[in-house]
Image (cartoon, rainbow, N blue to C red):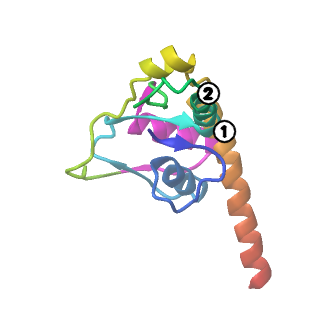
Amino acid sequence: FNTYGPRMRPDDGRVISNFIMQALQNKPITVYGTGEQTRSFCYVNDLIDGLVRLMHTADDVTGPMNLGNPVEFTMLELANLVIELTGSRSEIRFLPLPVDDPRQRQPDIGCALRELNWKPGIALRDGLATTIAYFEDLVSSRYARTAAAG
């Protein structure tokens, strides 16, 4: 369910890393279709907390158990938020929606709430700020290495 946070690879093909890298380089942000399809994003610390709680449960607690953030955002909302938080000059470029692109991705965390007393606590805006700071450091150190080598 779209886990994100620092230490993501900039080229992993996930929407958050793609949007952040495009924004930091002032490249167009690629949004498919109208951008109205939704996704849920879980900050890595929240996911780890859920996994640790799951590991400490009694043997009779079994799955499946969804760990993710049930709060949905459209791809267009995400793109605009990344542009805002990075201060980017990027524009949004709309491309045709792939045939297999799901319209909605939202975990049902009812079991995790009941069995683990777990729900995510880090808002997308806050998690993105930390993730963007990581990518900014990554990009600036990459440019510094390139400049030193050139």
Outermost residue, bottom direction?
150
Q: Position of residue 135 (x, y in %)?
A: 66, 54
User: Label 1: how many residues lie within 10 Å, few (<14), some (14-19) or many (20+)?
Assistant: some
Q: Residue at x 62, y 36 (%)?
A: 48
Outermost residue, right direction?
148
Q: Position of residue 141 (x, y in %)?
A: 75, 65
Q: Which residue is mark 2?
A: 53
Describe residue 63's horizontal placement relative to residue 16 as left or right.
left
Secondary structure beneath dot 1 equals helix
Q: Position of residue 14 (x, y in %)?
A: 46, 52
Pointer 2 with pointer 1, Cβ within 8 A: no
Disc 2 or 1, which lies upstream in sequence? 2
Q: Quadrant of residue 130?
A: top right
Q: Quadrant of residue 26?
A: bottom right
Q: Nearer the viewer, residue 43 or 95?
A: 43
Viewport quadrant of the C terminus: bottom right
Q: Which residue is mark 1?
A: 129
- Which region shows up in magenta? 71-93
| Residue 91 within the segment the image draws in magenta | yes
| Residue 22 within the segment the image draws in magenta | no
Q: Residue at x 52, y 27 (%)?
A: 59
Q: Nearer the viewer, residue 141 or 113?
A: 113
Amino acid at dot 2: Arg
